[in-house]
Amino acid sequence: MRCPFCRVDNDRVVDSRSGEDGVTIRRRRECLACKRRFTTYERVEETPLRVIKKDKRRVPYEPEKLRRGIEKACWNLNVSVEQIDNIVSAVETDAFEKHDREVPSSYLGELVMRELRKVNQVAYVRFASVYKEFKDVSEFMEVLEEFMKGRGGSAAALRRELTAGGGARPDPDAGESRRPR
Ligand SMILES: [Zn+2]
């Protein structure tokens, strides 16, 4: 495994334990070159779950895509890596429980919003604004009003917070594969 700090591919495993979901294995590794430690997560390669996109195409579920969308929404906010892990895990647990073979991308999006809402309002609004593409104006206004109420904030303050990511935009297709790699 390549070290995220010095890029050298030479490490030893310090600790291994299975994740709470029972699907992932978390390994604590120490880079033998720079002695820093990092964590990797392994999961079974064959994920049977497929994502049904808006145009009805089926693509394999890719947890990294889901995580990337969440990370973008949380960029520059007071959200820890652990909280992001927990969101990914909560979304997956729910999706795998209710859908054993195929899950609509819209369902994943709703789950992400539900979890983000618990953790950080700004991340939630960022994700929702992109995910919903402003198509459902009334629902988005509800989100905004709730947000403003919670902070006693002005429109200017909201704009400042939402753009604090320096243009970072959450992936509207979280959990989807937009183009083949
Ligand atoms: Zn290193």
Image: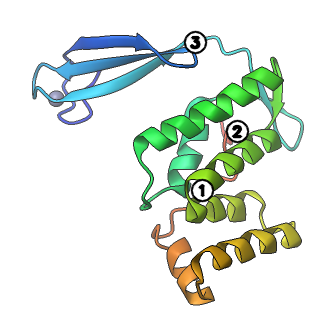
Residue 45 in view, yes or no: yes
Q: Quadrant of the N terminus?
A: top left
Tag of residue 88:
none
Ligand 1 image position (quadrant): top left
Rendering coords of residue 169 (x, y %): 57, 61
Mark 3 vs mark 1, CA separation in Å: 26 Å
Tag of residue 176:
2
Nearest to N terminus: mark 2 or mark 3: 3
Q: Amino acid at mark 2?
A: Glu
Q: Which quadrant of the structure image shows residue 144?
A: bottom right
Mark 2 vs mark 3, CA separation in Å: 17 Å
Instruction: Tell me the residue at 57%/48% (across/down).
Output: 70
Rendering coords of residue 57 (x, y %): 85, 33
Residue 97 lies, with reference to residue 90, above or below; the image says: above
Mark 2 vs mark 1, CA separation in Å: 13 Å
> Residue at label 1?
170
Nearest to N terminus: mark 2 or mark 1: 1
Q: Amino acid at mark 3?
A: Glu
Does any atom of ligand 1 lie closer than 8 Å to the CB of label 2? no
Does any atom of ligand 1 lie closer than 8 Å to the CB of label 1? no
Circle 1 crowding by C-alpha within 10 Å: few under 14, some 14–19, many from 20:
many
> Residue at label 3?
45
Instruction: Tell me the residue at 45%/70% (across/down).
Output: 166
Rendering coords of residue 152 (x, y %): 60, 83
Query: SS for tag 3?
Result: loop
Query: SS for tag 2?
Result: loop
Circle 3 crowding by C-alpha within 10 Å: few under 14, some 14–19, many from 20:
few
Q: Is residue 2 left or right of 98 when viewed as pictured?
A: left
Query: SS for tag 1?
Result: loop
